[in-house]
Image (spheres, rainbow, N blue to C red):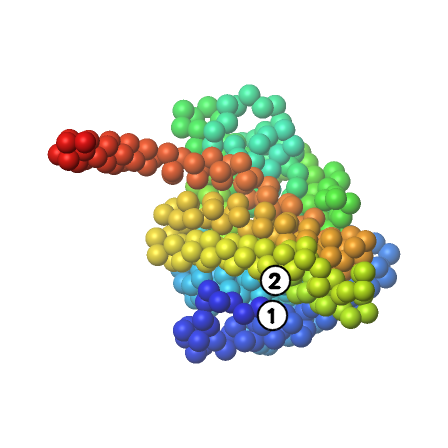
Amino acid sequence: MATNSLVDITNFSPEFQELYAKAKDFVENECIPAEALYDAQMGLTADRWKATPPVLEELKAKAQRLGLWNLFLGKAYAEGPGLTTVEYGLIAELTGRCPKLAPEAMNCSAPDTGNMEVLARYGTAAQKAKWLVPLMEGKIRSSFAMTEPRRAVSEAVDGADDDARPAETRIHRDGDAYVINGRKWWISGAASPRCGLYLVMGKTDPDNKDRRKHQSMVIVPADSPGISIVRPMKIFGYDDAPDGHCEVAFKNVRVPLDNIILGEGRGIEVTQNRLGPGRIHHSMRCIGMAERALELMIARVTDPTRRSFGKTLAEHGTIIQDIAVSRIEIDAARFLVLNAARRIDEVDVKGALKEISMAKIAAPNMLLRVLDRAMQAHGAAGLSQDFPLAKFYASAHTLRYADGPDELHKNLLSKFELRRAPAIAESINAQKEKSHHLLKGAKL
């Protein structure tokens, strides 16, 4: 484990120090060693899409006994342990070192975390009892159905759509039920046999003059008639079974009116509050993956049995430069992410949009660069199943799209910067005027 020079854990409460130490030990000595067994157990099943490797359930039981459970639910939620965003961010970095097992083992994996936050924040008492409780107990999993094949994800987030797209999901009232018709894709966890519900975004009022009130969010039981898994989508050839990222069709799917979240026309509002913390969680896990990639690289290039031109790889100039640049980039990204987390703690998600966008852009891109250097140092082995680097790379690249693509966040960030233009112009003009008076007074 690299030393985190940006955060001194001893400055945190004794309770958090103990929790952090437990999480660190759990990831390093329980989850990472179990990766190969997980893959082996997956490979032994006749149908990978119906598999639940026993080692995962064993890790979940251990995590619960250690108190490493549902740590993502912060101070605003009575159901959680009350960590700050910064504190959970540090835990998320640890789980990022073993992204396939550690987050789920601790019941802190997407999309469940965001869905649980939605239910905890906006759910009725009945919705919480039926859906939040089993999710928090780890008995079921869930999916978040927003992205559509013929619709940009940014439109669903910022409401800037024009109603001209033929494949948008519709949610309309029919007596005592909502009826859902549409198609979604890249729906993580939709194929899992443990998936109990979808949170589905769709239009309930497409003619509303306020575009941000077009959409609503409803709870859809995964076993509802009319839902069909069209296909699992692949990421660079990986299908991520048994959970997957699926294309899903909804045809005349009926759910009770009580399954609406917060109310009709509130879908954009709910989604924005759901995505903010999730972006920080993803970004911190990127830091953890990058740290592990750098460690694997260092181990590889210092292996005395691997020599090139009579030297270990670490004795070559290009390698040591790659290591140095990776260290700089990891720490720089960590600063941006922790700064965003601190800002969320101070002013909530809406007040931290600028910092969240910076972190969301920086962390996945940093991770891809670090992984590329690590894979190069491993040679062809870096592309293989013998190391986690290639899988990390595929996952990291998805984070440039998930929860809003880089371009969306860059546009938002540029708007914050351009708002400063009048003040900047005023300052520059004042400087010029003062410079003119100084020159005139000096008679030069």
User: Which residue is rendered at x = 81% and y = 53% of the image?
Assistant: 380
Q: Of the residues under marks 2 and 1, which one precedes in the sequence?
A: 1
User: Which residue is rendered at x = 61% and y = 75% of the image?
Assistant: 25
Please state, as top left, top right, bottom left or bottom right, where the C terminus lies in the image: top left
Please provide percent x and percent y for residue 126: 49, 54
Residue with the mark numbered 1: 1
State the image quarter where residue 22 is shown.
bottom right
Q: CA distance from mark 2 to mark 1?
A: 8 Å
User: Which residue is rendered at x = 40% and y = 54% of the image?
Assistant: 344
SS of the residue under disc 2: helix
Q: Is residue 61 above or below residue 404?
A: below
Please state, as top left, top right, bottom left or bottom right, where the N terminus lies in the image: bottom right
Residue with the mark numbered 2: 291
Please provide percent x and percent y for residue 388: 73, 59
Residues 290 and 273: in front is: 290
Residues 129 and 431: in front is: 431
**What's under tag 1, amino acid-wise?**
Met
Within 10 Å of the Cα at label 2, are there few (<14), some (14-19), or many (20+) other Cα atoms? many
Q: Is residue 393 above or below residue 33?
A: above
Residues 425 and 24: in front is: 425
Examine the rendering and report whether any part of residue 406 can be seen: yes
Q: Is residue 426 above or below residue 28?
A: above
Q: Is residue 197 left or right of residue 90?
A: right
Q: How many marks?
A: 2
Examine the rendering and report whether any part of residue 132 can be seen: no
State the image quarter where residue 201 is shown.
top right
Are discs 2 and 1 less than 8 Å apart at CB? yes
SS of the residue under disc 1: loop
**What's under tag 2, amino acid-wise?**
Glu
